[in-house]
Amino acid sequence: MASVTYDHVWKKFGDFTALNDLNIQVEDKEFLVLVGPSGCGKTTALRCLAGLEEVSGGKVLIGNNPVNDVAPKDRDIAMVFQSYALYPHMTVFDNMAFGLKLRKVPKNEIKTRVEDAAKILGIEQLLKRKPRELSGGQRQRVAVGRAIVREPKVFLFDEPLSNLDAKLRVQTRAEISKLHQRLQTTFIYVTHDQTEAMTMASRIAVMNKGVLQQLDTPQNLYDRPANLFVAGFIGSPAMNFFPAHLRKEGSSLCVDLGSAVLNVPEDRTATYMPYVDREVIFGIRPENIHNPLFVPAGIHAEPVEAKVDVTELMGNEILLYLVTGDNQFVARVDPRTRFTMGEKVQVVFNMDNFHLFDPATDRENPQAVR
């Protein structure tokens, strides 16, 4: 097993910078997820580690060993791609065994490794089939099995679930999480799906335009995003943002949205007092906006008048798309809510859970510990 280090890694394609001074330390046996929108550099980072791309600057290390000049086949990694890349004329057994045969591994050991991996993945009964006889989920398990038999120091996954339907994605991501616990190996996983990242990772690296935005645990990314990009990317539906003005009223603070004025709870007044009379961006997640009839006990609730634009009944909750003044926002409310499209309603904001960002830097201002 091994740690992985990106030490001031740059990758350029001509004038385009795909990775901009990337610094990440992945601990031994960790499950790290690289997440971000298309073109953010996450797959490039994975390919640089695998040796499929040469870095333009900096060092990539596996364990304590720089691998910049090491051939991909000698890096002791195994990669699962978005496409299953199975040989159609080979059986499942032969697909899984192919890499071992190239390495001249003894036949008895190949048989043992393939059968053990198939048992772990629940595909023992498929070993004699060809890929065309398999479902998408089964093919994906074969691709994972082909990586397992290698017994590498590091597993790399490049959006392996994107070709599966929604139900199978949920099932397979649970299987990959259990596989990590069982193998106790370093996993580095690339996805654009923040739900996958939040449910699978021990830590998440959020990237945008080749730059690492924040590296932290899923809960810390959700509770304490470093900037507007992370706040808007992590969470579904995304955090709501309002241009606002922070001002003082007597000994209290309030956030003026233009169409509503929200009082800051007393226990957070001292934190934000240095930022009085400044323009800010007020952020609040949809789950912290409630129907007044079903407000959780003990919160600092501030009312906001709004008009219902769209309603989405999800069964266990309702998503309300609302408009107040010039601002559109989303609320995730109790399923007993009976608001209708076009109706003028009142919702309440939970002011125990809000964020203020600096419009000039996009960073939380201040980054208060809550």
Image: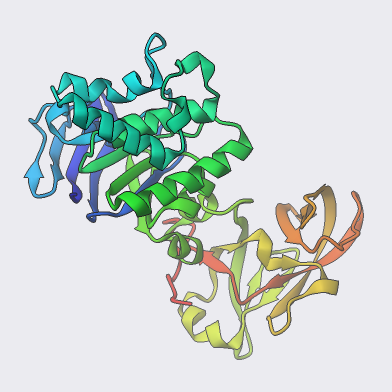
Q: Is residue 157 visible?
A: no
- At x 60% / y 76%, what residue is drawn? 247
Using the rendered view, name the quadrant where residue 257 is placed.
bottom right
Q: Is residue 270 above or below residue 214?
A: below
Relative to 135, is 75 on the left or the right?
left
**Number of marks:** 0
Comparing 318 with 248, the one in front is: 318
Q: Is residue 365 above or below residue 178?
A: below
The image position of residue 304, as x and y in percent, is 78, 68
- At x 20% / y 43%, what residue is drawn? 153
The image position of residue 69, as x and y in percent, is 7, 30
Q: Is residue 300 above or below residue 312?
A: below
The image position of residue 233, as x and y in percent, is 51, 49
- At x 30% / y 54%, what residue is drawn? 30
Q: Is residue 147 visible?
A: yes
The image position of residue 75, as x and y in percent, is 15, 34
Using the rendered view, name the quadrant where residue 355 is placed.
bottom right
Using the rendered view, name the quadrant where residue 89 is placed.
top left
Comparing 185 with 13, the one in front is: 185
Comparing 163 with 142, the one in front is: 142
Relative to 244, is 337 on the left or the right?
right
Q: Residue furthest front?
A: 108
